[in-house]
Image (spheres, rainbow, N blue to C red):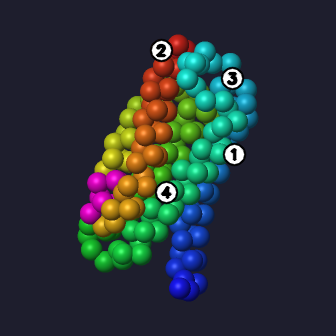
Amino acid sequence: MKIPAEKIMKLAGCILLCNLAGIISFLSTALSTRVWYRLLLRPVFAPSVWAYPSIWILFCTIMGISLWLVLEKGVKTRAAVTAVTIFLIQLTFNCLWLVVFFKLHLIFPALMLIGALVAFIIMNIILFYKISKLAAFILLPYLAWMIFVAIMNSVLFIYNG
């Protein structure tokens, strides 16, 4: 079965959009990640600084695939437009959290932001589920990761706040 070039380009565009958001945020915070983050008292369960780029590339790619699955169903209804809008909001909050935490070193505001981000991811999954169950299910590991990051952010605030 041959996949039309238009579908491949749309998939690549969705993956690129999500990864560009992650890469721009990561690049703007890279120096702080190497210096400031390493000076923090961290919980024993905190991943190595070197693990983050791989993890974010994986989750940004998954988010792009999820978005593509929804776009393939068409964005002709109000529900689909709302779902894609919530997706873009959660992607924006994801980038903002990286900047607020790693670049601005604001642990407590980052904690508030990640709480909102988790809420938007949950809304995103619920809305995507109504359009494409697969698009919703593949976001579950991303949700689990962000809950883990929220817990880690909480502990970092307790240790360093």
160 and 134: which is toward the camera: 134
CB within 8 Å, label 2 to label 1: no
Tell me the chief SS of the magenta region.
Answer: helix
Sequence-wise, which precedes: disc 2 or disc 4?
A: 4
Residue 16, image x, y percentages: 60, 64
Circle nearer the viewer, 2 or 4? 4
The relative height of residue 113 versus residue 161 in the rendered view (above or below) is: below
Distance CA(mark 2)–CA(mark 4): 31 Å
Sequence-wise, which precedes: disc 1 or disc 4?
A: 1
Sequence-wise, which precedes: disc 1 or disc 3?
A: 1
Where does label 2 land, which residue?
Answer: 158
Disc 1 crowd, CA 10 A, few/some/many (<14, 14-19, 20+): few
Name which residue type carries label 2. Answer: Ile
Q: Is residue 23 magenta?
A: no
Disc 2 crowd, CA 10 A, few/some/many (<14, 14-19, 20+): few
Dot 4: element? helix
Distance CA(mark 1)–CA(mark 4): 19 Å
Name which residue type carries label 1. Answer: Leu
Circle nearer the viewer, 1 or 4? 4
State the mark number for residue 63. 4
The relative height of residue 81 versus residue 56 in the rendered view (above or below) is: below
Instruction: Tell me the magenta residue range.
Output: 124-130
Name which residue type carries label 3. Answer: Arg
Is 26 on the left or on the right of 43, as rendered?
Answer: right
Measuring 54% from the left and 46% from the top, which residue is drawn there? 95
Dot 1: element? helix
